[in-house]
Image (cartoon, rainbow, N blue to C red):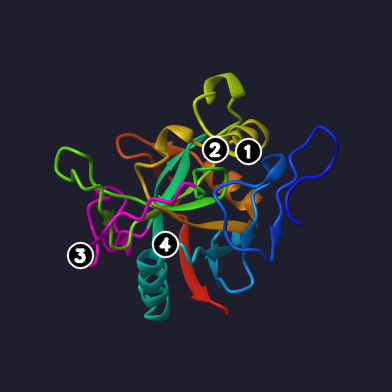
């Protein structure tokens, strides 16, 4: 088990069973033993994340880029407290303080992989993308990603969602309005506090870039 315990808290179970869109008692079961693990090292600490096998194109691309060292010394160039922290723009490497960031990538996109069981709870690792007007198929950026911080959402505001999502959002928080519009392809399993630390940095407008650079490197560890 991982996450929370106690009679008035959510129990989030990581188990040996197959990934399922629904589980009893609003508990989500996800098979992590066969998942690839990555460490997202930042200047504010490390996050360990699992990559979902239900989103194989995103998983394989993320692993490929990490193994190539693509992410090393890139920035979390967009940070919005209570929402998410975003990075993966190759143009952010060595970028000057006034550089406009957020439009770079490896030169390709990835088809959307929406899975009902995978949603934007706190710690979700998700793919950034261009907006619907220029990207009606909701294809993901080839390299830019974000990690959800979000905040608790009362169940009354998520009543049209499956029960397991309502429970998770009410207990640990997230960004439910992004569900089924942006591909969620992994989750942070250790280091949720690092998301909070990054999200708390001071930023500047426009672009929500941190005043002091928050660098990253990503390594596949198993």
Q: Residue at x 41, y 50 (%)?
A: 86
Inter-mark Cα distance, 3 to 2: 28 Å
- Circle 2 residues within 10 Å: few <14, some 14–19, many ≥20: many
Query: Which class describes the residues within 10 Å of circle 1: few (<14), some (14-19), or many (20+)?
Result: many
Residue 6 in percent (x, y) is at: 85, 39
Rendered-image quadrant of the N terminus: bottom right
Q: Which structural element holds mark 3?
A: loop
Task: Please identify the quarter of the rendering in which residue 207 is found.
Answer: top left
Disc 4 element: loop
For the record, the magenta segment spans 88-116
List x then y, in percent, for residue 183.
38, 51
In 3D space, how far apart are the residues under numbered discs 4 and 1 (Cα atoms)?
21 Å
Q: Earlier in the sequence, mark 1 or mark 2?
A: 1
Q: Is residue 164 left or right of residue 118?
A: right
Q: Residues within 10 Å of mark 4 (few under 14, many from 20)?
A: some
| Residue 212, percent from left and from top | 45, 50
Q: Are marks 4 and 1 in contact (CB under 8 Å)?
A: no
Q: How far, Cα to Cα, is label 4 from label 3?
A: 17 Å
Position of residue 50 in the picture relative to residue 116 (left or right): right
Tell which tag, 4 or 2, sits nearer the viewer: 4
Which comes before the other along the chain, label 4 or label 2? 4
Residue at figure coordinates x 48%, y 37% from the top left: 83
Q: Are marks 4 and 3 in contact (CB under 8 Å)?
A: no
Disc 4 designates what residue? 55
Identify residue for label 3. Answer: 108
């Amino acid at each position: 088990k991982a996450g929370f315990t106690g009679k008035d808290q959510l129990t989030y179970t990581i188990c040996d069973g197959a990934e399922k869109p629904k589980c009893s008692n609003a508990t989500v079961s996800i098979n992590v033993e066969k998942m690839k693990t990555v460490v997202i090292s930042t200047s504010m600490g490390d996050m360990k994340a699992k990559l979902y096998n239900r989103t194989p194109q995103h998983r394989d691309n993320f692993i490929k880029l990490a193994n190539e060292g693509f992410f090393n010394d890139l920035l979390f160039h967009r940070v919005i407290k209570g929402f998410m922290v975003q990075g993966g723009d190759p143009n952010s490497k060595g970028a000057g303080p006034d550089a406009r960031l957020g439009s770079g990538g490896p030169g390709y996109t990835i088809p959307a992989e929406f899975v009902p069981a995978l949603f934007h709870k706190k710690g979700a690792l998700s793919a950034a993308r261009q907006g619907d007007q220029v990207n009606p198929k909701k294809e993901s950026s080839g390299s830019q990603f974000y990690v959800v911080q979000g905040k608790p959402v009362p169940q009354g505001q998520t009543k049209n969602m499956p029960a397991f999502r309502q429970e998770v959002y009410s207990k640990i928080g997230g960004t439910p309005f992004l569900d089924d519009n942006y591909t969620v392809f992994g989750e942070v399993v250790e280091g949720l506090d690092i998301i909070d630390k990054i999200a708390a940095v001071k930023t500047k407008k426009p672009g929500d870039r941190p005043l002091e650079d928050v660098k990253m490197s990503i390594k596949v560890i198993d």
